[in-house]
Image (spheres, rainbow, N blue to C red):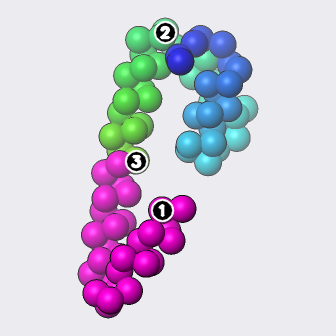
C-alpha cells in the first residue's frame, strides 16, 4: 500500500528507518512508482544488512549456542 499522503506509509517508513516522521516529509512528494522503488531498495538493503549481521554472529557464537541465540534475536 503506497500512497502519496503522509499518513500510515510515512509512519511505517519512519519506524523501519528509526527516524522521526518529520525528517521524511519529502517522501510524501514522491510519485507512487518512486515510493515503490524506494521501498524495494530499502527492503533489499535491510535484508542484506540482516544477512551480514547473521554471518558475523555465526562466526562469533559457539556452534552449540547459535540456534537458540539466533532464534532469540529474530523475535
Q: Is residue 68 left or right of residue 13?
A: left
Q: Residue at x 28, y 87 (%)?
A: 63
Q: Residue at x 48, y 11 (%)?
A: 32
Q: Main secondary structure of the magenta part?
A: helix
Mark 1: give few (<14), some (14-19) or many (20+) Cα within 10 Å.
few
Does the segment drawn in magenta span residue 58? yes
Alpha carbon of mark 1 to alpha carbon of mark 2: how far?
33 Å
* x and y percentages locating residue 29 in the rendered image: 58, 13
Q: Which residue is mark 2?
A: 31
Mark 3: give few (<14), some (14-19) or many (20+) Cα within 10 Å.
some
Which residue is at the front of the view, 66 or 9? Answer: 66
Is residue 48 at all visible to an observer of this figure? yes
Please give the label number shown on residue 74.
1
* x and y percentages locating residue 14 in the rendered image: 63, 38
Please give the label number shown on residue 46.
3
Which residue is at the front of the view, 65 or 33? Answer: 65
Label whose residue precedes the other's in the sequence (1 or 2): 2
Q: Residue at x 49, y 9 (%)?
A: 31
Alpha carbon of mark 2 to alpha carbon of mark 3: how far?
22 Å
**Looking at the image, is 8 positioned above or below residue 16?**
above
In this picture, which residue range is highlighted in magenta? Answer: 47-75
Amino acid at each position: 500500500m503506497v500512497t502519496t499522503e503522509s499518513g500510515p506509509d510515512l509512519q511505517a517508513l519512519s519506524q523501519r528507518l528509526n527516524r522521526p516522521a518529520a525528517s521524511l516529509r519529502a517522501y510524501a512528494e514522491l510519485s507512487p512508482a518512486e515510493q515503490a522503488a524506494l521501498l524495494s531498495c530499502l527492503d533489499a538493503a535491510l535484508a542484506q544488512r540482516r544477512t551480514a549481521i547473521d554471518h558475523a554472529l555465526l562466526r562469533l557464537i559457539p556452534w552449540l549456542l547459535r540456534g537458540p541465540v539466533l532464534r532469540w534475536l529474530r523475535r
